[in-house]
Amino acid sequence: MAFFTAKFQPLEFQKPEPKELFKLGYGIQGEIIIPPPLPNGIEFDKNKKVRNIDQIINEIENNNLENISLLEWVYCLFSKHSWDIENPNKSLPTSQKIWKFTKESDALKLRLFWRLVLYTFNPNEKILPFSLADTCPSFEPQTEFDKSLIKILNLLIKNAYKELAEICLNKLIQPDKLLTQYSLPYKINIDDNLTLVEAIQLSFPLALKTIQNINEKQINFLIETLNILSPYPQLKTVENLLNNISADVGGKYPKLVNWLKNNYGLTGNNSRWNQLSIEAKKALKQWIGAVNYRDFEKLVDLIINRLNLEDWEIRQLRNRKVFWSNYTDRFDRIRILLPASSIQIVGNNINQEDITSLIYDGSEATEVCIFDFDKWFIVEFFRGKGSETRIFPKSNELENLFFNSDDISLKQLRSLSIARNNVHDHRYCWQSDCETLLRSKNILPNQGTRYFKIVERQPGFPYNFNSGMPPLKQSQINDRNRQLIDWKRDIQQLEAEAKNKIF
C-alpha cells in the first residue's frame, strides 16, 4: 500500500509599512477614527502640556488648586502611591492638603470618597494611596449633606451594617439607592456569598429590633426586601428575623407572619422549612402561634364588648382567653366559625382568611374556634348551654372538615365521634382539670412557663411540666363535681339532638 505525504508551504504576507498603519487610523471608509469622549467634567486642552506627578504635587504644595485639571487629579490619585514611597516625608502633608482642597472641588471630593469606599473593602488593591486613606479625618464637612456623607462613610468603614440598615428602614429606601444618593459605590462583594447591599439588607431584622414603634410601612418594606433577595441572603435574613425578634412582637404583624408561613412554613407550597435551623423553626412556630392566639384574643374581646352578655358569661370568656394564653407557642393554625349574628361585630378586625360562617341548624348561637395543636384538634365552643371544649386526634377526614370545608354547623361538630373524657367543661375550677387533660396528650404550655395564668392581671399558680398546677382542695373538688352534674346532662342532650340531625 502506497502512502502519500503532502508538503505545506507557509503563506507569505507583505510586511506592513508605517504608512499602512497610518492609513488604518483613517478607518475603513477613509474617515478619521475619533477616540471615545472623556467623562463629564474632564476637559482635554490640546495646548496644555501633559505634566508628571512631581509637577502636580508641586501645585498642591503651593495651594494652586485652580491650576490642576480634573484629568490631572485622576492621574494624581492613581500615581500618588508610588510618589509617596519615594517621598515618605511629604506623603501625609500633601494628602492632608488634597483633602482640604475638597472644600472647593465637589468633583475631587466625590472621586476621593468613591475610591475610599472601594479601598475599605479591597485594601490590597491600589485604589487609593494609603496616605489619603489615613488622612481622611482632615476632611471638614461644609454642609448637612457632607455630614450625612461622612456618617455613612464611617459606618461603611466600621462594617456597621445594622446602623446602615436603620437608616434604610427609617427612610424606606434600599441600600443601593441610599449609597447612590451620596455618589458612593455599592456593587461590592463582601465575600463569595454576599454583596454589600445584601449584607445591609440581611441586617434589617436587627435594625427592626431597635425601633420602638414599628409601623406598617416598615413591615411592608421588609416584606418587599425579602421578596427581592436571592435565596441565600433571604434565608439568612429570615433566620435573623426569627432569632432576634420575639414572637410577642412578631405576632403583631399578621402580614409578615403570613409571608413566613407561605415561604418557610411547615405546610406551605415550595416551602424552605427544611433549610431553617432548629432554633429558627422553633421561633417560626412561636410567631405563628402568637398571631393565631391574637386572633382568638381579639374575637373574645369583640364578643365581650359588643354583645349583651351576662356578667358570668363575660367572666368565663375572659378566663378562657387567659387560659389559652399559656399555650400561644403551640397554635399551629386557627379557624374561627361564627354564627350570622357575630359576623358583623367582627368586621375586618380579624384575618378574614381564618373566618367561616356557621350554617344555621337551630342550635343556640355560639362562636367556635378550632385550634391545630400538632397531633390534636381542639374545638372550643364559646357560649351557650354546653360551652365545651372538644379534643380530637388528628385525621385526614377531620382535617378536611375543620380547615377546608365551608359547610359546618354546630350540630355537625357535636355529632362527631369522640371519647367521653375528651369533652371538657368550663364550670367551677375547670382550668386545673383541663390542663391535666391537655398534659396527658402532651399538649404543654409555652416553654419556660413557671406560673400558669388562669385570671387576668394575676401571676397564676406555680407550674411544673410533670405535675402541672397545685391540686385542688377537697372542698373545691366537691363543689366542682356538683356543678358538673347539670353540665353533663346538658352535653348529653346537645349530642343527642346533634346525632338525630342528618348531615
Image: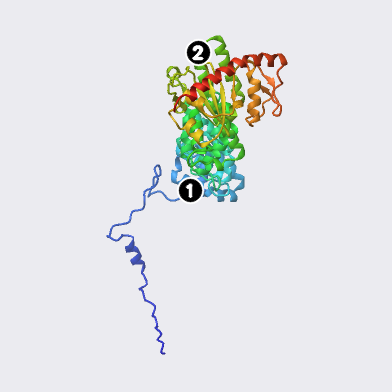
Q: Are discs 1 and 2 less than 8 Å apart at CB?
A: no
The residue beneath circle 2 is: 305
In the rendered image, which quarter is residue 16 located in? bottom left
Marked residue nearer the N-terminal end (1 or 2): 1
| Secondary element at tag 1 | helix
The correct choice, above or below, for 424 with respect to 51 in the image is: above
Residue that extends furthest to the bottom in the rendered view of this protein: 1
Quarter of the image with the N terminus is bottom left
Instruction: Tell me residue 18's x, y (percent).
Output: 36, 67
Q: Position of residue 307 (x, y in %)?
A: 48, 12
**Where residue 55 appears, x then y in whole percent?**
50, 48
Spatial CA distance of label 1 from label 2 is 75 Å
Q: Nearer the viewer, residue 157 or 61?
A: 157
Q: Quadrant of the C terminus?
A: top left
Looking at the picture, how far across and down is residue 363, in whole percent?
47, 19
- Of residues 342 and 473, the one nearer the viewer is 473
Q: How is the image coloured?
A: rainbow
The image shows residue 99, relative to residue 192, as above or below, that is above
Q: Amino acid at mark 2?
A: Asn
What label does residue 370 carry, if any?
none
Asked whether residue 138 is in view, the answer is no
Q: Residue at x 52, y 17 (%)?
A: 383
For the residue pair 61 and 118, the one nearer the viewer reads as: 118
Dot 1 amino acid type: Tyr
Residue at which label 1 appears: 75
* SS for callout 2: helix
Q: Residues within 10 Å of mark 2 (few under 14, many from 20)?
A: few
